Image (cartoon, grey):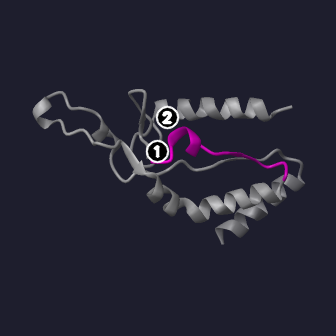
Amino acid sequence: MFAAAFRNTVLRLSASGKNVVIFVDWPELDFNPRSCLPRPVAVFSHVRPLCGVPRSQVDARNRAYREAIFKMKREFSGLRVFDPFPYLCDSRACYAMQAGHLLYQDDNHLSAAGSAYLGGKFVAEQSIASP
């Protein structure tokens, strides 16, 4: 149902002459990202060994959604898709923190730093894709 409704939306927007850009959802975490930060008192500080979610878990959870999005990208030649996975993930995991900054404020919402980071990547990609 999602794929059909989403395709219909893209079809209608494209048919009306709109430039359509899809910002693909970022990976959800299965933990509180604040657990990646050390606590001020060392006795109570148990920093997560991996400040992220295993890539295999993320891929399994997002497979159907991502397949629907990228199928539409193949169908609609003018459709632009921004995929945050290359900026948040590697082959091992998808990370909640980068360069000492939390990218998430909770398990599925970006922090101000995460929004600025992905926003910058989005703008850079769009400027490369624009004629």
- Image coords of residue 59 (percent x, y): 52, 58
Point out the tag, 1 or 2, that comes first from the N-terminus. Answer: 1
Q: Which residue is mark 1?
A: 109
**Callout 2 secondary element:** helix
**Callout 1 secondary element:** loop
Residue 91 falls inside the magenta stretch: yes
**Residue furthest to the front:** 91
**Residue in front for this viewpoint, 67 or 111:** 67
At x 78%, y 64%, the residue is 8
**Residue in front for this viewpoint, 116 or 66:** 66
- Image coords of residue 107 (percent x, y): 40, 48
Residue 54 vertical placement versus 130 (above, below):
below
Query: Start and end of the magenta stretch?
Result: 77-92
- Image coords of residue 49 (percent x, y): 28, 42
The number of discs equals 2
Query: What is the CA distance from the residue labelled 1 to the residue labelled 2?
Result: 9 Å
Depth-wise, is mark 1 or mark 2 nearer the camera? 2
Question: Which kind of residue does numbered mark 2 sit on?
Answer: Gly
The quarter of the image holding the N terminus is bottom right
The label on residue 114 is 2
**Residue furthest to the left:** 43
The quarter of the image holding the C terminus is top right
Instruction: For label 2, count other residues whose C-alpha is less than 10 Å away and answer few (under 14), some (14-19) or many (20+).
Output: many
- Among the 4 quarters of the image, the one containing residue 50: top left
- Image coords of residue 18 (percent x, y): 84, 46
